[in-house]
Amino acid sequence: MYKKTILIDLDGVLNNYNGHFDLNNIPEIKDGAKNFLKTLYNTYKIKIFTTRDKEIVIKWIKKYNVQKYISDITNIKEPAWLHVDDRCIKFDGNY
């Protein structure tokens, strides 16, 4: 079965990122994030978007037991049906 891809930003969307970047530590998962991923997983292919080290992200995903829901981790904003990011502005054509 084909599933549309959703690209989800890690910091600020799935975790409690507060703007203080720590290279070796990823903040705790946000309340509701695991259920969010679980719900999306039934219909969509989920990829995590982050500039963080992939191995550290894999450890974080396993720590919070959400690896079942994640198909990939990327640092490239790949084509996707939807991008979920806490730092974006929808461009409507008006500069």
Image: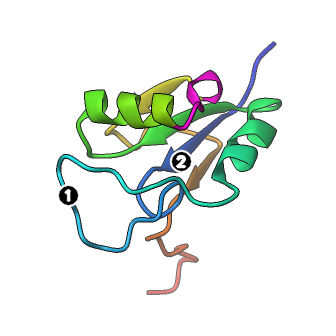
Q: Residue type at mark 2?
A: Ile
In the rendering, at what x and y percent does residue 94 appear?
A: 51, 85
Q: Residue furthest bottom?
A: 95
Quadrant housing residue 55: top left
Instruction: Classify the position of the N terminus by image quarter.
Output: top right
User: Residue at point 43% right, 71% down?
Assistant: 87
In the rendering, at what x and y percent does residue 57 appear?
A: 36, 36
User: Residue at point 73% right, 49% down?
Assistant: 36
- Crowd around label 2: few <14 · some 14–19 · many ≥20 (10 Å): many
User: Residue at point 76% right, 18% down?
Assistant: 2
> Where 8 sits versus 16, above or below?
above
Query: What segment carries the magenta color?
Result: 64-69
Q: Which residue matches tag 2?
A: 8
- Which badge, 2 or 1, comes first in the chain's sequence? 2
User: Residue at point 48% right, 39% down?
Assistant: 48
- Colour pattern: rainbow
In the rendering, at what x and y percent does residue 26 appear?
A: 33, 51
Q: Nearer the viewer, mark 2 or mark 1?
A: 1
- Crowd around label 1: few <14 · some 14–19 · many ≥20 (10 Å): few
> Where 51 sits versus 90, above or below?
above
Q: Residue type at mark 1?
A: Asp
Tell me the SS state at disc 1: loop
